[in-house]
Amino acid sequence: MSEIDAAAARVIDAYKTAVATRDIAAFMRLYDPAVRVFDAWGIWSYEGASAWQVAIEGWFASHPNDRLKVTFDEVRSVATPAFTSLSAIVTYAVVSAQGAPVDAMQNRLSWVLKTSGHVLRIIHEHTSAPLGFEDKKAILQRPEKP
């Protein structure tokens, strides 16, 4: 694994930890102040970290008695010294205090990350879910592979 690949892995680990601990400050440190986020829910885009933080505060406040857990699968990245592009299938889950699954969904995630100093920060995030052709409803669970 190259140093840049290791840096991207550190961003993923920091993201998962910040979600699990609901640490808004740690989560927001992963993002560039001028980040643009195309989220899958409700808002067309979030322009800047302050706008994105409001959405994250709402997410972290949801399910106050349960745990939030994020899992990254099929991570692919391309890196240069200045930029990294990363895509993954991400599962966002809510787990009860007793460890039982409450709810979960999967999204397709793309990040563009830029090196600022010696830190890799997300400058663009895009999450999406495909829509069913017939019913136009979001498909929030990836079909099982054959």
Image (spheres, rainbow, N blue to C red):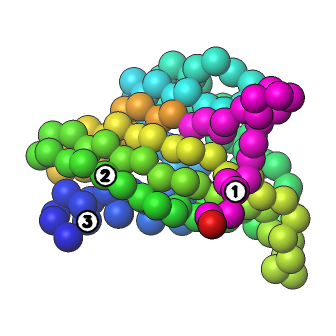
Q: Residues within 10 Å of mark 2 (few under 14, many from 20)?
A: some
- Tell us which disc is closer to us: 1 or 2: 1
Q: Is residue 56 left or right of residue 15?
A: right
Report if residue 110 lies within the magenta region: no
The residue lying at 58 percent from left, 55 percent from top is: 90
Quadrant of the image occupied by residue 38: top right
The residue under label 3 is 6
Magenta residues span 127-145
- Tell us which disc is closer to us: 3 or 2: 2
Residue 44: x percent and y percent? 64, 18
Q: Is residue 121 visible?
A: no
The residue lying at 24 percent from left, 48 percent from top is: 78
Q: Nearer the viewer, residue 59 or 88?
A: 88
For numbered disc 2, what is the local secondary structure? strand
Q: Are marks 1 and 2 in contact (CB under 8 Å)?
A: no
The residue lying at 37 percent from left, 32 percent from top is: 123
Q: Is residue 76 left or right of residue 46?
A: left
Q: CA distance from mark 3 to mark 1?
A: 30 Å
Q: Is residue 91 above or below residue 139?
A: below
The residue under label 2 is 77
Q: Is residue 97 visible?
A: yes
Name the amino acid type tagged 2.
Answer: Ser
Name the amino acid type tagged 3.
Answer: Ala
Q: Nearer the viewer, residue 49 or 103?
A: 103
Q: CA distance from mark 3 to mark 2?
A: 11 Å
Does label 3 or label 1 sit earlier along the sequence?
A: 3
The quarter of the image holding the N terminus is bottom left
The residue under label 1 is 143
Residue 37: x percent and y percent? 52, 28
